[in-house]
Amino acid sequence: DLIIVETTGLADPAAVARTILADADVAAFAYLDAVVGVVDAERGVKPVDEVTSAGKGLKSSIARLAFADRLVLNKCDLAPDEAALRCLETRLRAVNAAAPIR
């Protein structure tokens, strides 16, 4: 079986993971396999640039990307072009070099 916890918005993935890992009742039947960050390729690099250059208001966005074990690009078919996708991947690597991008 699989449990997926989706944390759209301002949820802190570290806090969610901590809750799952620290709860003995949950640990008795489940384990945390991965934290996956989803990135909208249609919107391009602008949101990532805003996150990396902005202040307090967007720290949770950068935390979600940095904390992820894997990054998934969605809406790739709606990205302006291949160059825009490559640019987005470069920006994501600057935030989280360890996570594979799919």
Image (cartoon, helix red, strand yellow):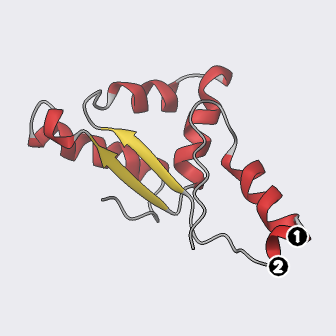
Which one is nearer the viewer's eye here, 32 or 63? 32
Q: Is residue 58 left or right of residue 25?
A: left
Quadrant hosting residue 28: bottom right
Spatial distance from mark 1 to mark 2, Cα to Cα? Answer: 5 Å
Residue 74 picture location, percent across and down:
30, 43
Residue 31 vs 20, above or below: the answer is below
- Quadrant containing the N terminus is bottom right
- Quadrant containing the C terminus is bottom left
Q: Secondary structure at mark 1?
A: helix
Question: Mark on residue 25?
Answer: 1
Query: Residue flagged by tag 1: what amino acid is it?
Result: Asp
Say which residue appears at 87% left-offset and 65% top-offset.
22
Q: Kindly identify which residue carries mark 2.
A: 28
Say which residue appears at 29% left-offset and 27% top-offset.
43
Q: Mark 1 and 2 residues: CB-CB less than 8 Å, in contact? A: yes
Looking at the image, the residue that sits furthest to the right is: 24
Say which residue appears at 31% left-offset and 31% top-offset.
45
| Label 1 crowd (10 A; few <14 / some 14-19 / many >=20) | few
Say which residue appears at 76% left-offset and 77% top-offset.
29
Residue 92 picture location, percent across and down:
39, 47
Q: Secondary structure at mark 2?
A: loop
